[in-house]
Image: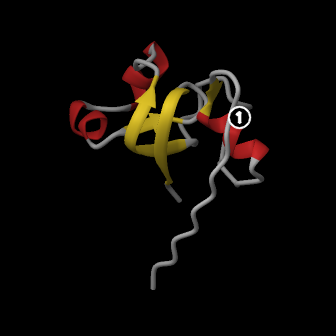
Amino acid sequence: MKVKFIKKTKIKKEKTILDVAKDLDLKVKASCGGKGKCGKCIVRVIEGDVSELTKAEKKFFDDDEIEKGLRLACEAKITGDVKIELID
């Protein structure tokens, strides 16, 4: 069975996906404390505006995963309206 929860919020400045998830009390694994080293905070950007891939993200993802929209929540900054899927 699949269950989908949708939470919306507004932010006043660019923040990482991880920071916004924390603001919304959403659980995103980040055992490195959001430093881009553990690769645990994987999310999928379904649509919308986020920052360019960082060096840390390029180490974790291959071309196919990047094409699917996978990002590290601690590295990707929200730059506009966006829809994000949390990956278990």
- Nearer to the camera, 59 or 86: 86
Q: Position of residue 57 (x, y in %)?
A: 44, 24
Of residues 85 and 80, the one drawn nearer to the viewer in this rendering: 80
Q: How many marks?
A: 1
Q: Is residue 9 above or below residue 71?
A: below
Percent x, y of residue 11: 69, 33
Name the residue type under label 1. Asp
Camera-side residue of 11 and 42: 11
Residue occupying image coordinates x 58% and y 68% = 5
The structure's colour scheme is: secondary structure
On the rendered image, what quadrant is the N terminus found in?
A: bottom left
Residue bearing the label numbered 1:
19
Rendering coords of residue 34 (x, y %): 68, 29
Kindly identify the residue that appears in the image at 65 percent across and 37 percent down: 18
- Where residue 75 appears, as percent x and y from the top left, is 56, 25
Q: Is residue 77 left or right of residue 53?
A: right
Residue at left offset 77%, top offset 53%: 25
Whether residue 37 is situated above or below residue 55 in the rendered picture: below
Q: Residue furthest top?
A: 55
Circle 1 SS class: helix
Q: Residues within 10 Å of mark 1 (few under 14, many from 20)?
A: some
Q: Is residue 28 above or below residue 31?
A: below
Residue occupying image coordinates x 67% and y 46%? 9
Q: Tell me: 63 left or right of 8.
A: left
